[in-house]
Amino acid sequence: METYRQEIQVAFSYPVTFTRGVFEADSPVLAGTLAARGEPGPHRALVYVDDGVVAAHPELPQRIRRYAERHAATIELARPPITVPGGERAKNGWNIVRNIMADIGNAHLDRHSFVIAVGGGSVLDCVGFAASIVHRGIRMVRVATTVLAQCDAGIGVKTGMDEHGVKNFAGTFAPPYAVLADFDFLATLADKYWHGGLSEAFKVAIIKDEAFFNYLERHAPDLAKRDGAVVGEAIKRTARLHLDHMRSGGDPFEMGAARPLDFGHWAAHKLELLSNYRLGHGQAVAVGIALDSRYAALSGRLTDGEATRIARAMQAVGLPVWDGLLEAGAGDGRPEILKGLEEFREHLGGRLTITLPQGIGRRVEVHEMDHALVLEAVRILKSAARREISVRAEREESRAGARTGAETDDLAS
Ligand SMILES: NC(=O)c1ccc[n+]([C@@H]2O[C@H](COP(=O)([O-])OP(=O)(O)OC[C@H]3O[C@@H](n4cnc5c(N)ncnc54)[C@H](O)[C@@H]3O)[C@@H](O)[C@H]2O)c1
Ligand SMILES: [Zn+2]
């Protein structure tokens, strides 16, 4: 027998740039990104734009054309910008991927040309997938337009498509050529996604960075009101923590069973599915974080006070920390939520590995979850939610009472 051990090391390097007005004619950012390697231009490109972004910015395709005309020495559009369905529709079914492959073939793009995708995490995943398989990979520039895409989904090394009834069942590891996060796009994003994306900020802060958690807690009311400066800071810090983890966590292509960046996600995946996607990913992750934080408190890893602080801070941002689906199936003794643990194990592969906070800002990996404690955590979240509802009702009642009193006074005077 003869064995030759082949060993290849490939380094990946790409910029993640935070900017504004990326398609303003005089912005140097995109043209500079394409020209950064000093290769002679113009660089041929196809541009795909999320239809939700186009609906909110109808002039965008025209603006992209003008941008290319202005920077004609650097960028040549092989076709005018192409609009693609945004949201999870992008990842469901293969027609969009087939069309993109055909476009790339018809335009004769080669491995040195560019595919540029402008949109949320779903469009970046779908267009990125198509670009990663044609010619075994065409250079991909992602222009991220949602909070989640700018701090998490759009900055990493993966693409994904939904198939076989499973989210991200198909996909590739395909580091991008560059990522551009344009904060100006966030103004038109629906609240569900604007606030929802911040769950990922809480996720990394709670397991990696106590000072950042304190920042989020302190600025929760600003985030609830969609403060642009605060969200920009939160996005950059979240992105840095994700990038640091991918770079130095030792497993960028996820070969192992541990996935610390999936803290709070085992329950979240199950809740998204049980809710038939009524719960957005961000909302489901917030509930998952609240559950795992309460579990961490019950198992001696957080204090009760820390678990309460976590829930209150997320709530103050406008994120849910309870959903009735946590109790689905509990009545007949088969709580659905517990099935999420086995499904999560299968999703990661190998041994069950769940990341929990160990004090705020640090983490620990566990390979077993005590089912009775999970259900106890559900019970505590429920009674906290009930208390919250009755306090709110009382407050509203007394406010209404004060109003009626004032009206009576008005009538009397
Ligand atoms: N590849 C990865 O590493 C990775 C990581 C995390 C999540 N993801 C994926 O990301 C996806 C979720 O992405 P998302 O949260 O960005 O949502 P999304 O891409 O599904 O977009 C949400 C909605 O907002 C619209 N939209 C996007 N930008 C807008 C803007 N600026 N103004 C107005 N509307 C806008 C879209 O058209 C869509 O209707 C999921 O499919 C998830 O699996 C991928
Ligand atoms: Zn997530």
Image (tube, rainbow, N blue to C red):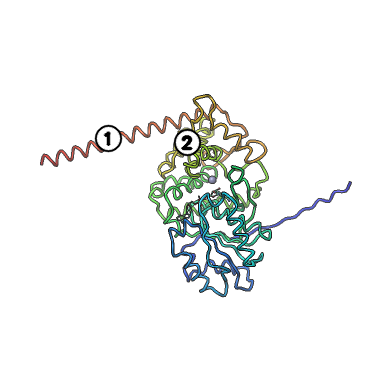
Q: Which mark is residue 174?
A: none
Q: Where is residue 100 shown, x and y percent of the image? A: 60, 59
Q: Amino acid at mark 1?
A: Glu
Query: Height in image: 347 above or below 298?
Result: below
Tell me the crowding category of disc 2: few under 14, some 14 to 19, or many 20 or more residues within 10 angstroms, Cα based. many
- Location of residue 363 by image quarter: top right
Name the residue furthest left: 413
Query: Height in image: 273 above or below 3?
Result: above
Q: Nearer the viewer, residue 142 or 242?
A: 142
Circle 1 sits in a helix, a strand or a loop, which is it?
Answer: helix
Q: Nearer the viewer, residue 104 or 216?
A: 104
Q: Which mark is residue 307?
A: 2
Q: Where is residue 408 shown, x and y percent of the image? A: 15, 38
Q: Where is residue 270 shown, x and y percent of the image? A: 54, 37
Q: Nearer the viewer, mark 1 or mark 2?
A: 1
Q: Quadrant of the C terminus?
A: top left
Position of 2 with respect to 262 (left or right) is right
In whole angstroms, how far apart are the C-alphas of marks 1 and 2?
A: 29 Å
Q: Nearer the viewer, residue 232 or 175?
A: 175
Q: Where is residue 249 shown, x and y percent of the image? A: 63, 48
Say how many tags the image has: 2
- Location of residue 347 by image quarter: top right
Tell me the crowding category of disc 1: few under 14, some 14 to 19, or many 20 or more residues within 10 angstroms, Cα based. few
Position of 231 with respect to 267 (left or right) is left
Name the residue furthest top: 332
Disc with the residue nearer the chain's start (1 vs 2): 2
- The residue identified by callout 1 is 397
Name the residue furthest bottom: 73
Q: Nearer the viewer, residue 356 or 291?
A: 291
